[in-house]
Amino acid sequence: MKTIQEQFNEITLIKVFEIAVIDKRTNKEEYIVFNIDINGNTLKATHEALNKVEQESNKIAFKSIEIDDTFSLNHHLEELYSECINAIIESDFFELLND
């Protein structure tokens, strides 16, 4: 059985979540792109600042989850996606675009 890292490395698509939002500052429709990567035992999604604390920090903003090999890669990606959605819901700068 392949590890989560091996399965992730075999993905041929661009490894991102692209989520439609409204920028509260401009009231325009945009997309936030979360770039997905594995760092050690962590699945990580980096993104632009979603709140004032992230914007003022000199660190790259991200959401992450710990990898548990008892679950599938798909399960991990779904969990990380939920983290990203929740971050947008709690954002100072963006709100989810309702289709």
Image (cartoon, rainbow, N blue to C red):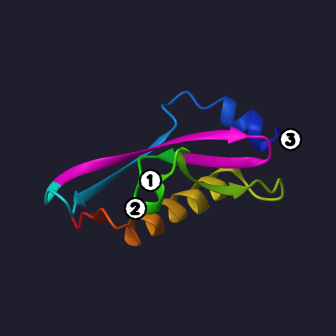
Q: Give coordinates of residue 34: x percent, y percent.
A: 46, 46
What is the CA distance from the residue labelled 1 to the residue labelled 2?
6 Å
Q: Which residue is mark 2?
A: 52
Tell me what residue is drawn at x 67 percent, y 37 percent: 8
What is the CA distance from the residue labelled 2 to the residue labelled 3?
43 Å
The answer to whether residue 61 shows anywhere in this view is yes
Residue range highlighted in magenta: 29-45
Q: Give coordinates of residue 35: x percent, y percent.
A: 50, 40
Give the camera-side residue of 6 and 81: 81
- Contact (Cβ within 8 Å) of mark 1 with mark 2: yes
Pick whichever of labels 3 and 1 is earlier in the sequence.
3
Residue 18 located within the stretch drawn in magenta: no
Vertical relation: 84 (above or below) 18? below
Vertical relation: 52 (above or below) 13? below
* Three-letter amino acid code of the residue under disc 1: Glu
Mark 3 element type = loop
The answer to whether residue 51 shows anywhere in this view is no
Residue 43 located within the stretch drawn in magenta: yes
Tell me what residue is drawn at x 27 percent, y 58 percent: 21
Give the camera-side residue of 53 and 4: 53
Q: Which residue is mark 1?
A: 56
Tell me what residue is drawn at x 67 percent, y 48 percent: 43
